[in-house]
Amino acid sequence: MNLLRKILFPFAILYGFITSVRNYLFDKGILKSNAFDIPVIAVGNLSVGGTGKTPQIEYLIRLLSDKYKVATLSRGYKRKSEGFVLAGAASNAEILGDEPFQFYQKFPNIQVAVDADRTNGITQLLSQNEKPQVILLDDAYQHRKVKAGFYILLSSYDDLYADDFMLPTGNLRESRSGATRANLIIVTKCPKDLNAEKQEQIRLKLKPTSSQQIYFTFIDYDDSIYGKEQKIAVNEIKNESKLLLAGIAKPKPFFDYLKNEKDETLIFPDHHHFSDSDLDSIQSKAGSKKIITTEKDFVRLKDSKLASQLYYLPIKSTFIGHSQNFDATVLEYVKSNSEA
């Protein structure tokens, strides 16, 4: 914890008090939560950014979309549009935000919507002629004006909420006690070889309730990179000199997977909107080398002047055992709360 964060400790106490009062008012029904008659699954975290929400939402899409009409609803962080927007042929990352646009491009058989007002967003989705049968709320754990039927809480292996503190001293959006609202907890971005003993140590630290299940996942990187018209195996370019580019919260694992001593790296803020000067700078630094970026950054850059030398590395969330139990739990919730 740096000195400034220590100095701001009194504000963290105040922020924690305010969020606790807010949660108490929702828990007691003094502030209204809106419930809906279809399955609504909220995926989120207690801390700010970097817990792997996007690959977890994609996992749920793959799990559910063959059996149900699925919609995702996100805030659309840093988008240039306002209000409710349903993705369509004219949509792009500026209209939807990078993550929703990624969902839209990867999963053409689902509905993708954005709205900062999740209650309005769900209402609008349910007013469509082809209304969804299940809605996935992206980054909505603290959006308590909607009462989701099922909550999935994510916590990063290297930044567990049990070790964290309230903003601005730490990174928590609300008290650790907020974890009790979750139906299940996923510890994300674990080492692939995380053993049973270490898993148990983490369970003891997180102190789940008797009804909560804890799962462990790791980020599984694709063995190929993809451009607009080309696919190349990672082992073919691993030793090649290239520019690695990331505008995500925690890019180190991405760099570590691809980097060699000849590579250069460029880091931009999470959800960064690349300006013309940014593109010129990237192009100048890359020269004729390949530029490899994250999938989330690619959706913002694929139609830019960098397109001819730009590639992305897909990722997915993979469970360290017990994935069948997770799948069965989610599918049972959706089945039991769906219309006959």
Image (cartoon, grey):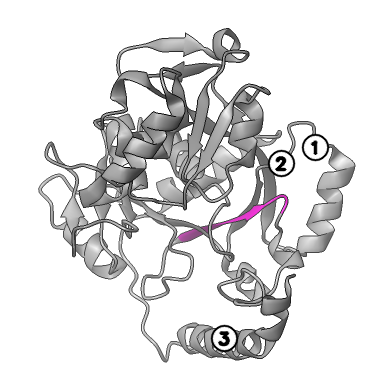
Secondary structure type for disc 2:
loop
**Residue 14 is drawn in which quadrant?**
bottom right
Marker disc for residue 190 = 2
Residue 185 position in % (x across, y down): 63, 55
**Does the rendering let one see residue 99?**
yes
Q: Is residue 154 above or below residue 161?
A: above
Q: Is residue 44 above or below residue 266?
A: below
1 and 2 marks in contact (CB < 8 Å):
yes
Specify the amino acid type for callout 1: Leu
Q: Nearer the viewer, mark 3 or mark 1?
A: 3
- Give 245 or 116, whichever is nearer the viewer: 245
- Give 118 or 159, whichever is nearer the viewer: 159
Secondary structure type for disc 1:
loop
| Lower position in the chain sequence, tag 3 or tag 1 | 3
User: What is the spatial separation of the Cα atoms under label 1 and label 2, in whole angstroms?
Assistant: 7 Å
At x 30% / y 50%, what residue is drawn?
97
Specify the amino acid type for callout 2: Cys
Which residue in the protein does label 3 denote? 15
Residue 154 position in % (x across, y down): 59, 54
Q: Which residues are magenta?
A: 150-158
Q: Is residue 243 above or below residue 117?
A: above
Specify the amino acid type for callout 3: Tyr
Q: Nearer the viewer, mark 2 or mark 3?
A: 3
Quadrant for the N terminus, please.
Answer: bottom right
**Residue 162 is drawn in which quadrant?**
bottom right
Which residue in the protein does label 1 denote? 194
